[in-house]
Amino acid sequence: MNINTIVSTLESIIWSNWLVGLCLLAGIYFSIRMAFPQVRLFKDMITLLRSGQTTETGVTPFQAFATSVGGRVGVGNIAGVATAIAIGGPGAVFWMWLSAFLGAGSAFTESALAQAYKVKSGDVYIGGPAYFIEKGIGMKWYAVLFALATILAPGVLMPSAQTHTIATSVQSGFGINMTITGVILVVLLALIIFGGVKRIGKTAEIIAPFMALGYVVVAFIIIGANIGRVPEIFGLIFSSAFAMNALYGGIIGSAISWGVKRGVYSNEAGQGSGAIVSAAAEADHPASQGLVQAFSVYIDTLVVCSATAFMILITDSYNVIGEGLAAPITEHLPGVEYGVLYTQEAVNTLLAGFGDKFIAVSVFLFAFTSLMAYYYQAESNVSYLFPNKPLAITIFRLIFLGTSFYGVLNTSELIWTFGDLGVGIMAWLNIIAILILSNQGIKLLKDYEEQKKQGLDPVFNPATIGIKSEVWEAKYREKRGK
């Protein structure tokens, strides 16, 4: 049995229908119990995003948001969306939307808990699921398991999908050898990750808004040129999502599975990775950063992923091959491999010759910020397992640079399977943990809203929900003058 078979078998076990169902049900549970904060408190999300300032120990809420968006907005938004359409049909787009809307509730909970249980390490804040599992649930072994999974997933298994997609798109757009691109990427990454979390936050703050805005603008140009087909595309998505389209009715299971799977890979809601970044932010209340991170899920899926989906569908730049079918159901691009090439073809329909280069640049920016976020997520858990051990961090940095370069040397099928395996392992461990701690997550939101109703600027007192935290106790005394 070769490595491809082993990894594919493990991935199919991890990403069974049980995990798809768990992601959806967790989102429904949190959304209902908190009365849909992703809708009610949308205005607060925008306001909080602009608030706060950096300190010696924490980054601004916007920098944490930008780093999180940088991690979420990656090749999954370009190649991942195309893959979902190719295997699950147009209906997969609806299930991506639903996973994002419901996932915002899970994203709030995990990020608020990460803030509530964050600690100070040296001169920065760190935290995430490993910390709230140990301190909130009281299961050290579970926390260690999550930390190991997070070092393995974003630190080892997931980077290669980003670097491989960068290298292949740059080679397609500019004719640059993949190995050369890989070397340049590793050098750039080294300059940033050896600078620590603040350099990562500052870099993401600059790149993330620019890359997302530029990509969406081009998408709107493509969609605008085909504006008459928008109602038709909405109809295609919804009819395919509920097996009402005769052409795609037979792959409704794949539509749901791949829509949720690629949605979670892209927006990371419930995976726990956004929570790790959230813990680094300087905030006055854990719920405020939870709301900011819930908004980042919207940006990723409802804006960027939707832009990709509409570009592909509205220009007929896709094939639908299903899973295990003898022949494609739909074949608009004969012989074209699914993935980033669909998006390049979509842009080329209006801007001939521009698509390859534009998507190459977009992929570079998207994937590079994802790599920065992956590094920080994994490094935080190295710090958890090896506190005050700078040598462990240095060794991990070298490993991360090596696994990143590995992506330019392997096949796309294997590295995407690696990535899905890593996401699935983290999602299982994290979603179960936040369900166990759901009452605390709900209390955090309730405390935030009660203070708002009293006309106060919410400040967190950890004693109100029974949390012991030197970080928050000191901050509360400072803010309330006690």
Image (tube, grey):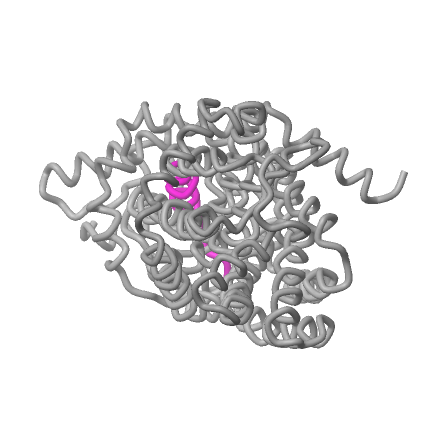
State the residue in front, 106 or 89. 89
Q: Is residue 109 magenta?
A: yes
Q: Quadrant of residue 7?
A: top right
Asked if 343 appears above or below 351 in the picture, the reply is above
Q: In the rendering, at what x and y percent does residue 83 appear?
A: 58, 45
Say if the magenta span includes residue 434.
Answer: no
The residue sitting at 31% across, 48% down in the picture is 228
What residue is rendered at 24% in x and 35% in y? 447
- Residue found at the far left of this picture: 455
Q: Is residue 365 left or right of residue 194?
A: left
The quadrant of the image that shows the N terminus is: top right
Asked if one can make out residue 470 in the rendered structure from this viewpoint, the answer is: no
Vertical side of 257 occupied by 93: above or below? below
Position of residue 440 in the picture relative to residue 85 (left or right): left
Q: Position of residue 320 (x, y in %)?
A: 59, 39
Residue 470 at x, y = what percent? Answer: 39, 48
Q: Is residue 85 visible?
A: yes
Which residue is at the far right? 1
As drawn, 416 above or below 373: above
Label count reads 0
Q: Nearer the viewer, residue 339 or 326?
A: 326
Figure quadrant of residue 342: bottom right
Q: Residue at x 47, y 55 (%)?
A: 73
Return the x and y of residue 97 as percentages of the image width and height. Answer: 40, 38
Q: Main secondary structure of the magenta part?
A: helix
Q: Which residues are magenta?
A: 107-122
